[in-house]
């Protein structure tokens, strides 16, 4: 992949042979986030899990103390009083069966998170092929299949993010924006790591965190000292 001049200059500031402390890594990522927009700071966590085994599937959600810096659009599948509750709580879109053709046939995907009441999962299940690959299927573990739609919406708007293994057993999650202070990014990152450490499968043999990298949207990755994170 061809990289630009700015990326090449930024990459020179990162020593590939070093595993950085969190504070140093965050400072470096912020310094190298020089794009014309407010870059997202992301964590990429390579685990020793094997996602093919159900008991090693890591999935959950955590509310970042300082949010993600991103405005999240929420779609809620609910009916009756629960639909009214979702509207009142500030959901961007609320609906039921009538949304199926819009999403399936018209390719409407103007939302970032989907919440559903349990009774609507039969309907939402029909969208599995569309929502599944995009990581948008509601899930009880992530708190997005719930009767308490107000809490779900409030948590998401407050900065709740979902983490899960991808096919290569890596977790990719945003931890804030480059415009955040170093302290805000450190708080968010530590909250995420604490949640992921708690989610460690009891059946796992060997290393849990193999590598942790922080990066901004356009910047080079900075590797962290995993031994210090796992303590």
Image (cartoon, grey):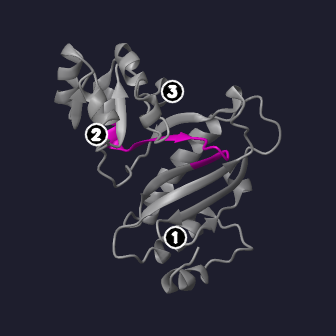
In the rendered image, which residue does mark 2 sit on? Answer: 106
Secondary element under disc 1, as helix, strand or loop, is helix
In the rendered image, which residue does mark 3 sit on? Answer: 141
Q: Which residues are magenta?
A: 154-171
In the depicted view, which residue is nearer to us: 38 or 31?
A: 38
In the rendered image, which residue does mark 1 sit on? Answer: 29
Say if 1 sits above or below 59 in the image.
below
Secondary element under disc 2, as helix, strand or loop, is loop
Task: Give the mark nearest the N terminus, 1 or 3.
Answer: 1
In the depicted view, which residue is nearer to us: 127 or 51?
A: 127
For the point 28% across and 43% down, which residue is it? 73
**Cβ atoms under marks 1 and 3 closer than 8 Å:** no
Inter-mark Cα distance, 1 to 3: 31 Å
In the depicted view, which residue is nearer to us: 122 or 225?
A: 122
Residue lying at the far front in this picture: please name it.
105
Task: Give the mark nearest the N terminus, 2 or 3.
Answer: 2
Say if 82 sits above or below 72 in the image.
above
């Amino acid at each position: 992949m061809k990289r630009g001049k700015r990326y090449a200059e930024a990459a020179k500031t990162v020593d590939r042979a070093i595993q950085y402390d969190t504070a140093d890594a965050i400072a470096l990522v912020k310094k190298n986030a020089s794009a014309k927009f407010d870059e997202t700071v992301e964590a990429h966590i390579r685990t020793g899990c094997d996602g093919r085994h159900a008991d090693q599937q890591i999935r959950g959600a955590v509310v970042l103390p300082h949010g993600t810096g991103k405005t999240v659009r929420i779609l809620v599948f609910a009916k009756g009083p629960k639909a009214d509750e979702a509207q009142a709580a500030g959901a961007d879109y609320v609906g039921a069966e009538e949304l199926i053709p819009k999403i399936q046939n018209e390719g409407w995907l103007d939302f970032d998170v989907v919440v559903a009441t349990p009774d609507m999962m039969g309907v939402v299940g029909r969208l599995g092929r569309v929502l599944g690959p995009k990581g948008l299927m509601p899930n009880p573990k992530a708190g997005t299949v719930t009767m308490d739609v107000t809490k779900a919406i409030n948590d998401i708007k407050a900065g709740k993010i979902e983490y899960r293994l991808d096919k290569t057993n890596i977790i990719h999650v945003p931890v804030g924006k480059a415009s955040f202070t170093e302290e805000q990014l450190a708080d968010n990152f530590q909250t995420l790591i604490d949640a992921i450490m708690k989610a460690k499968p009891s059946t796992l043999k060997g290393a849990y965190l193999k590598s942790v990298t922080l990066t901004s949207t356009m910047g080079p990755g900075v590797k962290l000292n995993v031994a210090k994170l796992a303590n």
